Amino acid sequence: MIYPLVREPAVADAPYRVPVAVPCRVLGLARQPYYRWLACPVTDAELTEAYRANALFDAHRDDPESGHRFLLDEARAAGEAMAERTAWRICRDNGW
């Protein structure tokens, strides 16, 4: 995520305060998507993936030797429905 790079020099207590337009121009970004991100920094998709990863991790913590298919079944039993490919990707990314 590149938007924190825009926010850091623009905060009020920064030693050298820079207007938002300057880092946006340097990074080649438009200001409106930055302000949209500032209003809601966590998207619905990221929140859903976090809930799914949490359900998979809870199942992994109970039985660390299980594969992603078992973890998927446990997550589905806990109420987090997802595709098998999604469970595999989350497990792979986190090294479970």
Image (cartoon, rainbow, N blue to C red):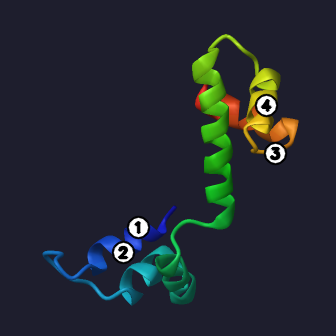
Q: Is residue 8 left or right of residue 35?
A: left
What residue is pinned by disc 1?
A: 4
The residue positioned 65% from the left and 37% from the top of the image is: 55
Displayed quadrant of residue 82: top right
The residue positioned 73% from the left and 38% from the top of the image is: 78
Q: Position of residue 28 (x, y in %)?
A: 53, 78
Q: Which of the two residues, 60 or 14, is positioned nearer the viewer here?
A: 60
Q: Secondary structure at mark 3?
A: loop
- Structural distance between the alpha carbons of marks 2 and 3: 35 Å
- Structural distance between the alpha carbons of marks 1 and 3: 32 Å
User: Which amino acid type is shown beneath numbered disc 3?
Assistant: Ala
What residue is pinned by disc 4?
A: 72
Displayed quadrant of residue 60: top right
Q: Secondary structure at mark 4?
A: helix
What residue is pinned by disc 3?
A: 81
Residue 96 visible to an observer of this rendering: no
Give the vertical position of 33 relative to 68 (above or below). Answer: below
Q: Are marks 2 and 3 in contact (CB under 8 Å)?
A: no
Sequence-wise first label, 1 or 3: 1
Q: Are marks 1 and 4 in contact (CB under 8 Å)?
A: no
Mark drawn on residue 94: none
- Structural distance between the alpha carbons of marks 2 and 4: 38 Å
- Structural distance between the alpha carbons of marks 1 and 4: 33 Å
Q: Position of residue 30 (x, y in %)?
A: 55, 85
User: Which amino acid type is shown beneath numbered disc 1?
Assistant: Pro
Sequence-wise first label, 4 or 3: 4
